[in-house]
Amino acid sequence: MTSTSQRAAPLPPDERRAALIASTLSLVLAEGPDVSTRQIAQAAGVAEGTIFRVFSTKDELVNAALASAYDSSPLLEELKTIDRTTSLEVRLVAAVEILQRRTARIFRLVDAIGLKAVEAGRNSKNLSDESALIGQILTDLIEPARERLQFEPREAARRLQLLTIACTHPRLVLNDPVAAPEIVSMLLDGVRLRSGPPEPLP
């Protein structure tokens, strides 16, 4: 009798590696770095031995998962996809939402493995470069509205980055982050040119 069941086709090596890394990162974020290879295999839907055909040790896999969390390439690519034809407010809300997801993820990682471990895994130069690249993309998003602003687009971008971190950091906002449209409103109401003096407060 011929069985009608079929085994799923094995993933290509790059996809298998990516699936293991993604599953490991999700587990580390949820439970900390002391997850077992059995848990990882179950989460990834593979046999435990598959892990060691891709990674020499569990530590190597965990380190690869942490490195993927620090990788800013997906963040930068997502920021670059924002539609430049929309209004300034719409562009900036989209950017802040992307940055908030990244910020929340990093701070979840800090809670899961500790600040020292996160700092040890992040290169300070890379972090500085990442911030500069984000700042440049935000500057480009703001540039078309230059004539409507009190500050240069680069300074407005810097302030937006600072506001986003301050309004998203879970310890600062007590796990109640400020919504992206409100963050953008705070920025623009501070840098937008006004036609006259502000109304006096009652």
Image: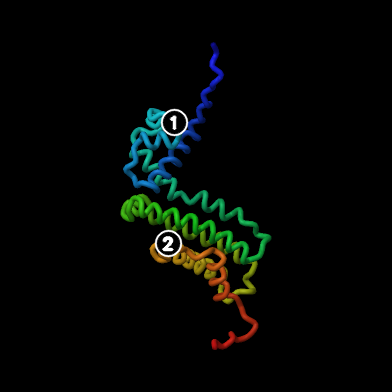
- The picture places residue 133, in percent across and down from the top left corner, at 51, 58
Give yes or no for contact between labels 1 and 2 (Cβ–Cβ under 8 Å): no
Q: Amino acid at mark 2?
A: Asn
Q: At which x and y percent is residue 20?
A: 44, 37
Where does the C terminus fall, quadrant-wise? bottom right
Q: Residue at the top extreme? A: 1
The residue at which mark 2 appears reads as: 175
Residue at 58% x, 63% y: name it.
Answer: 92
Left or right of residue 174: residue 184: right
Compared with 193, 80 (above or below) is above
* Inter-mark Cα distance, 1 to 2: 35 Å
Q: Residue at x 50, y 35 (%)?
A: 15
> Where does the N terminus fall, quadrant-wise?
top right
Residue 166, above or below 114:
below
- From the top left corner, tell me how far across and down residue 135 is, in percent: 52, 62
Residue closest to the far right? 85
Tell me: residue 202, above or below residue 92. below
| Residue at image point 55% right, 76% down | 190
Q: Nearer the viewer, residue 125 or 108?
A: 108
User: x%, y% of residue 86?
Assistant: 67, 61
Which quadrant would residue 103 be assigned to in this image? bottom left
Residue that badge 1 annotates: 46
Label 1: which secondary element: loop
